[in-house]
Image: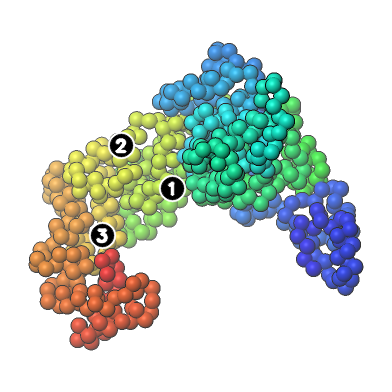
Amino acid sequence: MFVDECHRTQSGDLHDAMKAILPNAMFIGFTGTPLLKADKRRSIEVFGRYIHTYRFDEAVKDGVVLDLRYEARDIDQSITSEKNIDQWFEAKTKGLTDLAKAQLKQRWGTMKKVLSSQSRLEKIVADILMDMATRDRLQSGHGNAMLISGSIYEACKFYEIFDKTELSGRCAIVTSYTPSAADLKGEESGEGETEKLQEYAIYQEMLADWFNEAPETAVNKAEEFEKAVKKKFIEEPGQMKLLIVVDKLLTGFDAPPATYLYIDKPMQDHGLFQAICRVNRLDGDDKEYGYIIDYKDLFKSLEGAVKDYTSGAFDGYDKEDVAGLLEDRLGKARERLEETREAVKALCEPAEAPRDSEAFLRYFCAKDSGNAEQLKENEPNRLALYKLVAAFVRAFANLANELEEAGYSTEEIDTLKADVDFYEKVRSEVKLASGDYIDLKMYEPAMRRLIDTYIRAEDSEKISAFDDMSLIKLIVERGPNAVAALPKGLRENKEAVAETIENNVRRLILDEQPINPKYYEKMSELLDALIEQRRKEALDYQEYLRKIVELTRKVTDPAVGGSYPRAMNTPGRRALYDNLDKNEALALAVDDAVRASRQDDWRGNTFKVRKVKLAIKSTLSDDEALTDQILELVKNQNEY
């Protein structure tokens, strides 16, 4: 008999009844949380000794879950005067660039209004809003947060405040409360709204806004609302940034984007353990930790210098059972920053002096510009660079406003900032020069936002040009003027510009080769010849740019680069023509045979593929080798 949650269900009559019904059964107990001291003896009496234990810190080492970073925050209710509010803003933003600070100031009016209130809840709202504007995954929209409130009434008041800020429409309450008109009987006291009346009114307004319908009908859709917001929280974290809860969703709710858990409720032992594990799920490289922000100082860490997260709220557990579950955020953040910095430096160390743009391009891309084998061979190093620099930038951003508190001197902070700036530029230039930015495009806005916020902003506009189009597309559209869009470190070095364009053209040729092998073989030879001319200085720089632009356009569009008969008017037909020795009649015959024999979703079906193959084979006089070659070519054409 396998018993789940054994320590919570097997200490009373249920277990005795089970033993009576199954007297000869062997009972094996499972539990996902540590045993409380009080339950431990009873559980061991019932089930016997442990067969196997697997603690949280072991799961972190194995990469099954993420480590948790803990921070207790003191909400200073004396921040009400304008001077104190401005001081609070400066302290919270001292690591930001001037531009980022100015942009935050534009939204400052709302936050100022919130902070000037006497309400403790409004102070917490302001604190969370600042995190939303400055913390990596919250800022990028890749991650989101949960706020645990002390009661349904407080959850409603939190929502009411958030709904007047930029989180309006992107936060929701999920509690056990279901608004019902029956609950309102006897609540009219004549002395203002009671808590129950306010809960009902806030829920009614929230549901009406969500469903965009009359409050009277929307108020009956609380269950439908909960399903919808949970789905959005998991699938569209940027559109549902905060869930406000009380008891619901603290166990069993699996939401990988959830990165921050804010606690404003007394909690302990099992309930706390389950709750903090809401933010330890894996969710891509940019989620390195789960963060626990504690407004109730559950471990009394604000009272003393000793950071012991195995006592206080976890007093019910033996220390060894919860050791390593929570780590001090500030101390561990410094460790992580130094660790990522050293890893990036070690990776870049072998690049040749003077370690400028050109040297890094040769080390990470290709020593011989445009060399396909070298580009492929260096790919693991480039991927390591992107990953390590991104981790370094995130580690810096996580500590940027608290570097002094973490023990850095002014000189050390300046050096650290310069290192982040330098290696991020190396990463951007290598990514662009290799053509890898096409694959990494979805991560770039978030990374650039961090750089703009904490390091610099002057190159932002130029780099962002590559969010919407590749360098190749930019060259096709702008010609030689596309060079002006490159980052400063590249565009001021003619050799680096040439290598960047050549690597990108080579990458495109390799990617497109299966679509039309003969055509791209010819393009590859033309690129080799152009690179050779440049190296022998047979062309001046402007003439080189004109020729590489012309070649890029041919590589991008075979209709421009080849001379085709009028009937070769689709990419598929042109590919057949090029790979059938420019035999127009044969290319048209194969095209007709494929169109006549293909069926829906034919590529994934053995029988349907065979039908297409036989049609091609009969057109090619039963030449087996050529048939296989043309079948692969046809599979790679979108039009078939």
Residue 630's spot in the image, x, y percent? 25, 76
Which-is-in-front pick, marks 3 and 1? 3
The x and y percentages for residue 404 are 57, 26
Mark 3 closeness class: few <14, some 14–19, many ≥20 residues within 10 Å: many
Mark 1 residue crowding within 10 angstroms, few (<14) / some (14–19) / many (20+) = many
Counting every numbered tag in the picture gives 3
Looking at the image, tell me whether mark 3 or mark 1 is earlier in sequence order.
Answer: 1
Q: Specify whether 161 is left or right of 536.
A: right
Q: Front-most of 484 and 261?
A: 261
Disc 3 marks which residue?
509
Q: Which mark is residue 385?
A: 1
Helix, strand, or loop for circle 1?
helix
Q: Give residue 63's position: percent from left, percent from top.
A: 60, 54
Q: Is residue 585 above or below residue 545?
A: below
Q: Secondary structure at mark 3?
A: helix
- Per the rendering, the mark at residue 532 is none
Query: Going 75% across and 31% down the picture, which residue do you hit?
Result: 300
Q: Are marks 2 and 3 in contact (CB under 8 Å)?
A: no
Along the viewing direction, whichever of 423 and 457 lies nearer the viewer: 457
CA gap, disc 2 and disc 3: 26 Å
Q: Which residue is mark 2?
A: 462
Residue, x 15% and y 51% (percent of image)? 550
Under mark 1, the amino acid is: Leu
Q: Is residue 76 in sight in this rendering?
A: no
| Crowd rating for badge 2 (residues with CA inside 10 Å; few <14, some 14–19, many 20+) | some
Circle nearer the viewer, 1 or 2: 2
Question: Of marks 2 and 3, which one's residue comes earlier in the chain?
Answer: 2
Amino acid type, mark 3: Ile
Disc 2 on helix, strand or loop? Answer: helix
